[in-house]
Image: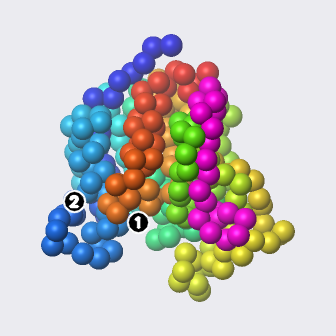
């Protein structure tokens, strides 16, 4: 099937700057405000994809033959922009959505208002964790690459705290999973990861998707359900950089995702 190489990448900063790409990350920088940013990913994306830019306002153009990264919006997207985004994807654009757990800063609500009515995908305001209440560290055997798994490295891929999906399009491909995990609603009275993270039989336990992708018209959408792997302090682990490259590789094959 024909490929559609991506030649540029644009990161959304028009709907909030959580995990901003505009922060510095040098020897004199310290603390959460520089560790929990995407400035290293921004530079890495420019090497993997092509020129990297920032969308600072909804009126600015979306990339031609490129990827648009919609990451953890802390401000709502207008219906006009959301409709334009759908038209852009159907015409061949590639959309990479970065979600986070428990609807932190209302990001799940803002993403659902765009994704659910236009693309048929909906996020849960929850968090996933393994059978003992800790972050998941699945290991996918290499043969799983035959089924579209991009995490088939035969070595652990650690996640931090992701969300689960309430609904997905019928043609969704599971690129990676969190492994066997519980799904727990968010509890903002608890500051540590916003929940007790206690395994119990009342919660869903399954192999939750960590990255879902599907074709839309001539374009494609991929959704990663944990924002932490691409933060600055995570960029030194090769598994995370591999996952980013692999998602880009999948988005460049929208017709393969369709079928």
Q: Is residue 178 visible?
A: yes
What is the crowding at mark 2: few (fewer than 14 residues within 10 Å), some, or many (at least 20)? some
Vertical placement of 179 versus 85: above or below?
Answer: below
Vertical placement of 156 versus 187: above or below?
Answer: above
**246 drawn magenta:** no
- SS label for mark 2: loop
Left/right placement of residue 88 relative to residue 123 reads left
CA gap, disc 2 to disc 1?
Answer: 16 Å
Q: Residue at x 70, y 70 (%)?
A: 132
Residue 207 percent across, percent down from the top left: 71, 50
Residue 12 percent across, percent down from the top left: 32, 52
Residue 18 percent across, percent down from the top left: 35, 65
Q: Which residue is denoted by mark 2 in the rendering?
A: 22
View extreme (top): residue: 1
Q: Is residue 96 visible?
A: no
The magenta stretch is 126-148
Task: Report the front residue among 177 and 87.
Answer: 177
View extreme (right): residue: 201
Q: Earlier in the sequence, mark 2 or mark 1?
A: 2
Nearer mark to the viewer, of 2 and 1: 2
Q: Residue at x 65, y 43 (%)?
A: 168
Left/right placement of residue 180 relative to residue 244 reads right
User: Tag on residue 74?
Assistant: 1
Q: Residue at x 35, y 67 (%)?
A: 36
Residue 79 percent across, percent down from the top left: 44, 50
Q: Quadrant of the C terminus?
A: top right
View extreme (bottom): residue: 189
Q: Residue at x 45, y 14 (%)?
A: 2
Vertical placement of 153 versus 100: above or below?
Answer: above
């Amino acid at each position: 099937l024909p490929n559609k190489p991506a030649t540029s990448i644009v990161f959304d900063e028009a709907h909030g700057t959580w995990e901003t790409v505009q922060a510095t990350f040098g020897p004199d920088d310290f603390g959460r405000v520089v560790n929990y940013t995407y400035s290293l990913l921004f530079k890495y994306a420019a090497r993997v994809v092509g020129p990297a830019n920032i969308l600072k306002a909804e009126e600015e153009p979306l990339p031609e033959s490129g990827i648009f990264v919609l990451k953890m919006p802390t401000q709502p997207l207008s219906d006009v922009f959301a409709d334009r985004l759908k038209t852009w994807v159907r015409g061949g654009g590639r959309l990479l959505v970065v979600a986070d757990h428990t609807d932190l800063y209302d990001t799940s609500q803002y993403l659902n208002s765009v994704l659910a009515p236009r693309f048929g995908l909906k996020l849960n305001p929850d968090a996933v964790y393994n059978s003992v209440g800790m972050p998941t560290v699945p290991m996918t055997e290499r043969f799983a690459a035959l089924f579209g798994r991009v995490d088939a490295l035969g070595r652990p891929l650690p996640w931090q705290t992701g969300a689960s999906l309430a609904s997905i399009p019928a043609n969704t491909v599971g690129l990676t999973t969190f492994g066997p995990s519980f799904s727990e609603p968010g509890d903002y009275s608890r500051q540590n990861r916003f929940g007790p993270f206690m395994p119990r039989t009342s919660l869903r336990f399954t192999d939750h998707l960590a990255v879902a992708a599907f074709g839309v018209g001539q374009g494609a959408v991929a959704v990663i359900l944990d924002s932490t792997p691409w933060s600055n302090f995570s960029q030194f682990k090769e598994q995370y950089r591999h996952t980013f490259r692999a998602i880009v590789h999948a988005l460049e094959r929208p017709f393969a995702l369709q079928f």
